[in-house]
Image (tube, grey):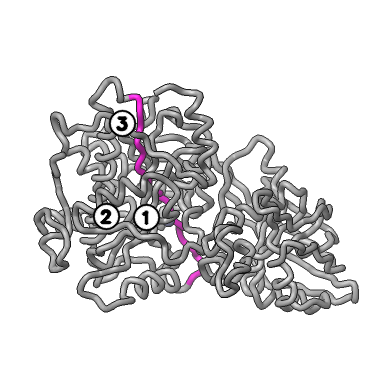
Amino acid sequence: MRIIIGLALAGFATGVGAAVAPEDVDAGAARIKHTIEVLASDEYEGRQPGTAGEEKTVAYLQSQFKQLGLAPGNPDGTYVQKVPMVGIFSSPVTTFTTSGGKVLQPAVVNDYIALSHRTVPDVEIKDSGVIFCGYGVVAPEYQWDDFKGVDVRGKTIIVLVNDPPVRDPRDPTKLDPNVFKGKAMTYYGRWTYKYEEATEKGAAACLIVHETGPAGYPFAVLSGSMSRENFSLQNPDGNAKRVAVEGWLTLDYARKLCAAAGFDYDRLKAAAVRPDFHPVDFKTTASFSVKNRIRTLDSRNVIAALPGADPAKAGQYLVYSAHWDHLGRNPALKGDQIYHGAEDNASGIGGLIEIAHEFAALSGSDRPKRTILFFAPTGEEQGLLGAEYYAQNPLYPLTHTLADINMDVLQQIGPAKDVVGVGFGNSTLDDVASAVLAKTGRVLVPEPEPEAGRFYRSDHFEFAKVGVPSFYINEGLDIPGKPEGFGKEQFDGYYSHDYHKVTDVIKPWWDLRGAALDADFLFQMGVAIDQSDVWPEWKPGCEFKARRDAMMAAVAH
Ligand SMILES: [Zn+2]
């Protein structure tokens, strides 16, 4: 394989790698920076679906893909896939009444948030019994059931975020690796799962207790959603089957509510870690009145294609993805009201365009044999909606889709020696990645915080859910020339200060050479996948493997 842009760590004082010129890295970094400057500018208004910001973003992406000579990615001859959505502003009023007659009215944002995805203007729940359901998990493979047959139809259930942290009987200082994957978060820990299970059980409302550590982000990340329009996919039944009220309680308020009902939060939490936990009736009622302001809209996924050069393989697809959308603007804020989303995910789009640039530069026998898709979904911030819509309405057969490689926030602190593989160990894509990285003296490493559940938090997860092997990276943390701990400090700093805040803007100290290196690595990874006859697959034990094996068994390649 000929390295075209050939970005590698050589040329930097890193002592690793053995390839190419630093000026290529600089050029890649400059292109990525330019994309971020455009998309994170005031003019794009925070790229909220259904706004002028969407129009501009979609137009910009199309023009970039056209300029690179890429074909329309939708077989209908366009660069877009319409995604029918519903946008809702919810205003909730909530009252708890204990059996002792105490009445509590939590304050929106300070104490809790709640919204309804039902597409009706008024959602009323009167005097629904409040039941604490531990982690709200039903996991047959771990013989775990937090409901124990208790009928929660029409009830308000309160659940804890993340998986039950079950201690290892052989070493109680650690979590049991055989139950809920130990320290790593499984899908049972995700808030989306909690609401799905509440829906399944017929609950009227589901309130999750927020704790920053187990959730992976502070409460402020959630409270912003009360002053914003929230989206879901359009559904013929108006989401009537979905749990009517979806909300979160702050930890402080959860303690207060427990105490008012005569319970101790920490005791309940400790009990919930045991497999013999039984739901606890608070002998308290909850009433909700949610006013919804509703509109329907067609948002758009953007998709471009580089058709495969080998007619025998052009009907096989490799997808690169990065969401274009962000959180729009909040007129209630003083000062800057725009969620610029420079890192999240203008940087990922920068990477997507950079990878497209590298593929488009390939000529002759270097051209990929298979079709490469460049996919920028909408509505990621609203629950991976654009990617979910694609996964349910794929433009190309999923059985002919080799893999999805996703970007969501790229490296801004300079070239790193490592790349963090989110969901490390899930698939053979890790092995492809490691082999590619080794050529430049770099290395793929597992997540330092698998408990944050990041594998479930970006668009590749929608591909995984329907079986397609998918790969997602976080920024590497080992930065040559910087003191130990520097990378982790920067990473944590972003999540506590800027993530989903108006301060997610380009910083003067950014060094996007790391982003350029990572984009090049993902490009090289795609080249390696394209050149191989071996299809990427989930590894044994991975929760997505059965689905992929079943769909592939039905098709001959
Ligand atoms: Zn993102």
> Disc 2, disc 1: CB below 8 Å?
yes
Judge the density around disc 1: few (<14), some (14-19), many (≥20) Cα neighbours within 10 Å: many
Residue with the mark numbered 1: 473
Q: Is residue 82 left or right of residue 474?
A: right
Q: CA distance from mark 3 to mark 2?
A: 24 Å
Q: Earlier in the sequence, mark 3 or mark 1?
A: 1
| Percent of width and height locating residue 433 | 31, 49
Q: Quadrant of the N terminus?
A: top left
Q: Nearer the observer, disc 3 or disc 2?
A: 3
Q: CA distance from mark 2 to mark 1?
A: 9 Å
Q: Amino acid at mark 1?
A: Ile
Say if residue 332 shows up in the picture.
Answer: no
Ligand 1 contact, mark 1 (Cβ < 8 Å): no
Relative to 116, residue 212 above or below: below
Residue with the mark numbered 2: 518
Ligand 1 contact, mark 2 (Cβ < 8 Å): no
State the extent of the magenta-drawn residues as a range: 315-333
Q: CA distance from mark 3 to mark 1?
A: 24 Å
Residue with the mark numbered 3: 533
Q: Is residue 523 left or right of residue 428?
A: left
Q: Secondary structure at mark 2?
A: helix
Judge the density around disc 2: few (<14), some (14-19), many (≥20) Cα neighbours within 10 Å: many
Tell which of 418 and 316 is nearer to you: 418
Say if residue 59 shows up in the picture.
Answer: yes
Predominant SS along the magenta part:
loop
332 magenta-colored: yes
Seen at 43% across and 69% down, the residue is 495
Figure quadrant, ligand 1: bottom left
